[in-house]
Image (cartoon, rainbow, N blue to C red):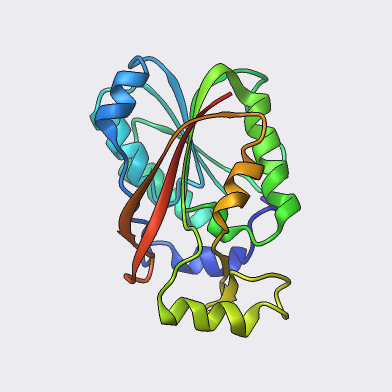
Amino acid sequence: MEAQNNPEFWNLAAGKKHSTHPLDLERLTRALPRDSVILDFGCGEGRLCRELVDRGFMNVLGIDFSPAMIRIAREQVPEAGFIATDSERLPCGDESIDAILLFAVLTCIADDAAQKKLLAEFRRVLRPGGLLLVSDYPLQTDPRNLTRYEEFKVELGGYGRFRLPDGATLRHHPREWFGELLEGFSVEESVELDAKTMNGNPARILQLWARR
């Protein structure tokens, strides 16, 4: 997908780098019937799809722009459906999805307009009242992150963007940006949690439960 950057990097990362953002399956199970159509956008190797299938959800779809990630996901979670796509338009009909998971994906999209375009697609495919669960990184406060925010803010066009030594351009977000990005959704709750980055560093994450 054009909104996501560094496709070569993510294909090479397949099988090596993993998101560890936790999914509150108990809450999700209370919120959704088992026959709900659930889309995990930016599914990577299918970790969340595996958790959903194991919990009894029967209509799970994972989408990722990395063919290498999708190949692994299909092997690990044959019960779910998976699509590799670089299209800006999701391969889903209007109002056809009950819930969307967006875990550690916004951090991979450095451009404001690209993020907004993606959220507009989510509004198109979600049914009225459909659930959007976002899990991502607000601006961190530790010295390592503060240093690289300053280092790259001019080159990459904004505070919070940075480049990893192995080539990926990533982004952390001011908290107010999440509110702007989710305009048109009703945010039911935001939850702060401790997690780790794909490189194993401790981080604070924000999870937002929202409805279309």
Is 41 in front, or is 144?
A: 144
Q: Residue at x 54, y 59 (%)?
A: 107
Is 41 in front, or is 117?
A: 117
Left or right of residue 98, residue 32 in this image? left
Left or right of residue 86, residue 99 in this image? left
Above or below 86: residue 165? below
Q: Residue at x 35, y 14 (%)?
A: 33
Above or below 15: residue 181? above
Q: Quadrant of the C terminus?
A: top right
Q: Which quarter of the picture shows residue 60?
A: top left
Q: Which quarter of the picture shows residue 66?
A: bottom right
Q: Residue at x 42, y 17 (%)?
A: 36
Is 114 in front, or is 183?
A: 183
Measured as percent of width and height from the top left, residue 166 is found at 51, 80
Measured as percent of width and height from the top left, residue 21 is found at 35, 51
Measured as percent of width and height from the top left, residue 48 is found at 35, 41
Above or below 145: residue 173? above
Q: Which quarter of the picture shows residue 5?
A: bottom right
Q: Residue at x 72, y 80 (%)?
A: 155
